[in-house]
Amino acid sequence: MAGSGKSTVARKIAEKYDLTFVSGGDTLKALALKEGYEPTHFGWWESKEGMLFLANRRRDFRFDEEVDRELLSMAKKGNVVLDSWTMPWLFKGGFKIWLEASPKKRVRRIAERDRMSFKATFEALKNKESETKAIYKKMYGFSLGEDFEPFDFVLDTDNLDRDQVLQVLSVMLDRDILASASS
């Protein structure tokens, strides 16, 4: 979920292992830009305009469908790290990691990152996650943040900083993924 560290760590993993990084959120923002939104500032997803785009997505799934088609295409090519809420359920290959963090920790991280108050961030995140969960439940039938069936590894990031998360994931990837690929 937002604030768990997934985007930060996904970028770092892509960099460390010389893979392509693709963000589902950035791809959605590019579509929003084409639709006349201005998703160019920190905290846009939690802003009024970001919430309007989210409401539009709930009425019209074409944005999410387009992003998911693009991400699936990238996943099939391989050598990519996808930062996506849908790909673990839609793409049948790859290695899937879920980063878990408590709502309080996630709100604190987002509030600091986006320079927002804790209260405003909490309300925006609650709304954003509720709407996003409803979109994916209706589109694909999975329960975001509740259904961990497609994941190969789940890591609680509450008490870890980004370097520690990267270290844990690197050890796991080196040992379990790269070692088995070379044997």
Image (spheres, rainbow, N blue to C red):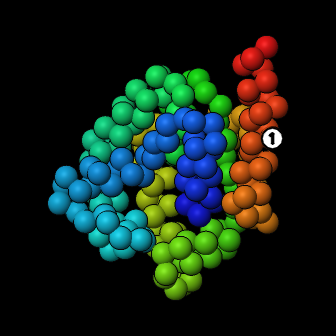
Q: Is residue 4 above or below residue 44?
A: above
Residue beneath the point at 51% across and 69% down = 125
From the top left corner, tell me how far across and down residue 152 is, in percent.
72, 34
Q: Is residue 172 above or below residue 104?
A: above
In this picture, residue 168 sits left or right of residue 82: right
Q: Is residue 85 above or below residue 180?
A: below
Question: In the rendered image, which quarter contains the N terminus?
Answer: bottom right
From the top left corner, tell me how far across and down residue 131 is, in percent.
43, 59
Question: In the rendered image, which quarter contains the C terminus?
Answer: top right
From the top left corner, tell me how far across and down residue 46 is, in percent.
42, 70
Q: Could you tell me the amino acid type at mark 1?
A: Val
Residue beneath the point at 61% across and 72% down = 109
Instruction: Tell me if I can see residue 103 in this picture.
Output: yes
Instruction: Tell me if I can see residue 87 in this picture.
Output: no
Viewer-nearest residue: 72 or 141: 72
Residue beneath the point at 72% across and 19% down = 181
Q: Which residue is mark 1?
A: 171
Mark 1: few, some, or many residues within 10 Å (few <14, many ≥20)? few
Residue 147 lies in quadrant: top right
